[in-house]
Amino acid sequence: MAIEFECPSCSETIRVPDAYSGRQGKCPSCNQRLLVPTIPVPDDLPGKGTQLTLPQESTGSVPGASIAAVVPQKAGFVARPRRSRRRPARALVIGIPVIGFLLLLGIIAFSISGNLPDLHGQFSATLLTNRSLPRTVIPWADTGLNADDRELLQTALRDSPERLSSEQMSCQLIGADEGLEVLVTVPSGSAWCVVETATDNNKSLQLWRKRERAQLNAERRAVFLKALKSWCNDKLRQIRGEKVLLDGVTVRDQVALASRLDAFGFAVEGRGDNRVFRPALESDGGLLYFSVPENTVRFSIQGRKSANGQAWFHGEYQVNVTAGQDASPAETGDAPTGDEANDMTPDARGQRPEKPRT
């Protein structure tokens, strides 16, 4: 059997074996690409060739024309194999983008982790015999109070300072001309432990400070200002006779202590013997002060979490504590030490208190 059809371009009649049903080729007369009409093909039909020279014998199927006249002997019909139209497997369509995305995440994670410093190691520390740390001052401008409220709060806190006491430390907020003075002391049975965190051999922490200090200090100041203004308003209401319950721990941590810390002290806490030690002061030279039990010989410094559960510091340092010594706990050298600091007024001290990092 054969398939007979006309070229859609030159209208010449073409006859090909039915094995070429549905295949593409060229008209032997005008070289126009065309598609052989599709007919059912028997299973036992031989022939898989891709090129065929059309027969030259005459046929009576087309009146007035013969195949030899329609299709020259030199021409041939070129049949092209069918293209596979199978779609790729669904698993490949979905899996390839997923694999690429996971590889990208791995590259990013490796790049970030490769640049992070190794925040682990050991610090040396010393117990001090001094019971109080230098006073610091919170400027009145940070409170946002008007002149009348400022004068009322200053007078009340000068005559009766706000005392925030716990097992670890005692904190006082005292009204002064320059602002709110902050005095922190340790109770009996505890001692100030000064930790050296800025040694030359601790390059990783220096790098961390360089990268994170500005952002963490901005967060610290935001927490500090919010807590300070809230406490001032509540304290003024209390002074005017209203019954207001103050959260002493929040005022101590977020107002008094936050005003005396830098980025590292704000981001960490001490842990030992199932207790948590909050830093009370951080000096410009990287000395960090904790109130710890007098018999403490070792504890760790770890990152603490923000209110939303975010860790501010990803690392851990072991602190080895040595015996106490008589030394001024501040680098300024002009702050009173010992219990006499509790009995001194700003005028009696004759020295200006240290300003906090606010």
Image: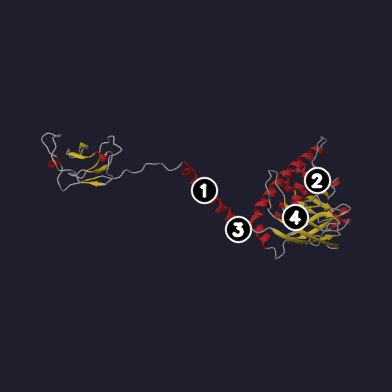
Pointer 1 or 4: first along the chain: 1
Q: Residue at image x 65%, y 60%?
A: 207
Provide the residue designation for mark 2. 154
Q: Residue 115 — which label?
A: 3
Q: Residue 301 — which label?
A: 4
Question: Residue 149 lies in what quarter of the image?
Answer: top right
Q: Mark 1–mark 4 contact, CB under 8 Å?
A: no
* Mark 3 element type: helix
Q: Which residue appears farthest toward the bottom when viewing the image?
A: 200
Residue 240 location (% of width, % of height) = 81, 37
> Gap between marks 1 and 4, in whole Å?
39 Å
Numbered circles on residues, count: 4
> Gap between marks 2 and 1, in whole Å?
65 Å
Identify the amino acid type marked 3: Asn
Pointer 2 or 3: first along the chain: 3
* Mark 1 element type: helix
